[in-house]
Amino acid sequence: MPFVKIVIYTPLSHADKIRQALAQSGAGHIGNYDACSFSVKGTGRFRPLKGSKPFIGKEGEIEEVEEERIETICTQENLQKALKEVKRVHPYEEPVIDIYPLLDI
């Protein structure tokens, strides 16, 4: 079954909600384990443009936010369900979500 890696950036305040949404949607299942993920903290930077509705920051001003990068795997078959659940709980108007295909080696 083909897998993808999902990488999500979120403010620290929502990291646990994102991990829970991923696990509940079936992402992070590896062999006899579930809810598997890896996280690292860093600084996200952005400037909300005119017409935006930022969760953090003000229109036209550069913002720096302590964020968590959460990564896990998911079957391609389950990807849309996982993305739907993440977007449901993610606070950002435009969440950054990267999807990488994984080689079957």
Image: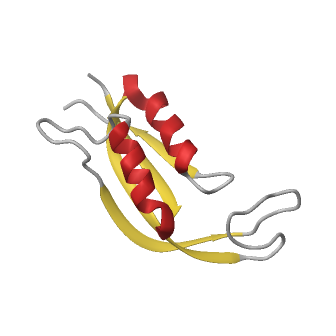
* Residue 23 percent location from the top left of the image: 33, 43
38 horizontally vs 34: left or right: right
Identify the residue shown where x is 29% and y is 58%.
Answer: 38
Q: Quadrant of the N terminus?
A: top left
Q: Which residue lies at the image location 34% right of the left edge and 35% below the top edge?
A: 74
Q: Is residue 75 left or right of residue 99?
A: left
Choose between 16 and 97: the one closer to the eye. 16
Measured as percent of width and height from the top left, residue 100 is found at 42, 41
Compared to residue 16, the image places residue 78 above or below, namely above
Report the colour scheme.
secondary structure
| Residue 61, image x, y percentages | 79, 76
- Above or below residue 4? Residue 39 is below
Residue at far left of view: 32
Residue 17 occupies quadrant: bottom left
Against 73, residue 66 (above or below) is below
Task: Residue 80 in the image: state x and y as whole percent.
Answer: 49, 29
Residue 102 occupies quadrant = top left
Q: Residue at x 50, y 44 (%)?
A: 86
Horizontal side, residue 46 vs residue 70: left or right: right
Number of numbered markers: 0
Q: Quadrant of the C terminus?
A: top left
Query: Which residue is at 36% across, 52% downward?
Result: 71
